[in-house]
Image (cartoon, rainbow, N blue to C red):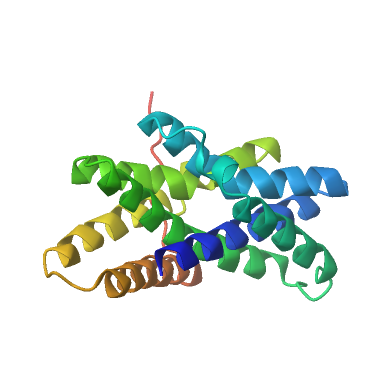
Amino acid sequence: MFHLLDIIGTMAFAMSGALTAMNKKLDPFGVFIIAFVTAVGGGTLRDVMIGRTPVGWMQDLTYVYVIILGFILTILFRKRLDKLRTSLALFDTIGLGVFTLIGIQKGIDYHLHPTICIALGTMTACFGGVIRDILCTEIPVIFRREIYATICILGGIVFFSLKKLNLNDDVLYLITSLVIITVRLMAVKYKWYLSPLEHKQ
């Protein structure tokens, strides 16, 4: 289940990056690069911070193949993905839910404190999107009013709360990812936002 979720998250973020790049009218090479950094950016930063080198995607070419497949599928079916904003939000949300879990589990594997594990999960889920948005000259979603990183933190709290119940790992992964995905989709649908801080003179 863990490996399957990792593949799904990689595919989802690759397609999210490709959709963003196509929306910016980049050429095919540019679209591929954005898809690639979106899919592996957060995980690469996480692996470097915990000293896991060479980083994951360099040790297992499956991730590279999955990114290439996501890129090709997005190009081939771009006309069917006519509701670009909806498609982007969906793929981004799936990646968010899955990669939060991946980061948390990597922290657990390195015997880190739950708080650090949640931080790694949030970083894994969000920083690929941060790199994507910066390269596409957008203010990253994580820094806007949208509830994004906060949901990853919530997912981490749910994960460690349920872990105390000694649930089967597959069930634990599934419930946590569904919580993150559901809350994110509800936040988008019902326009839940964090109020921006304003400087008052």
Q: Nearer the viewer, residue 200 or 119?
A: 119
Question: Is 125 situated left or right of 173 in this image?
Answer: right
- Splitting the image into 4 quarters, where does residue 49 fall? top left
Number of on-image labels: 0
Q: Nearer the viewer, residue 164 or 55?
A: 55
Single out the residue that lies furthest toward the top: 201
Q: Is residue 44 visible?
A: yes
Q: Quadrant of the N terminus?
A: bottom left
- Vertical comparison of 101 with 165: above or below: above
Q: Position of residue 177 (x, y in %)?
A: 38, 67
- Vertical comparison of 200 with 23: above or below: above
- Vertical comparison of 162 with 65: above or below: below
Question: Is 13 situated left or right of 161 in this image?
Answer: right
User: Which residue lies at the image location 76% right of the left edge and 64% below the top edge?
Assistant: 74
- Splitting the image into 4 quarters, where does residue 170 fall? bottom left
- Vertical comparison of 25 with 174: above or below: above
User: Which residue lies at the image location 47% right of the left edge and 58% below the top edge?
Assistant: 96
Single out the residue that lies furthest toward the right: 27
Q: Quadrant of the C terminus?
A: top left
Question: Is 148 situated left or right of 92 in this image?
Answer: left
Question: Is 71 situated left or right of 3 in this image?
Answer: right
Q: Position of residue 58 (x, y in %)?
A: 59, 40
Q: Position of residue 47 (x, y in %)?
A: 44, 37
Q: Position of residue 181 (x, y in %)?
A: 43, 68
User: Which residue lies at the image location 43% right of the left edge and 62% below the top edge?
Assistant: 97
Q: Is residue 195 visible?
A: no
User: Which residue lies at the image location 78% right of the left edge and 72% below the top edge?
Assistant: 82
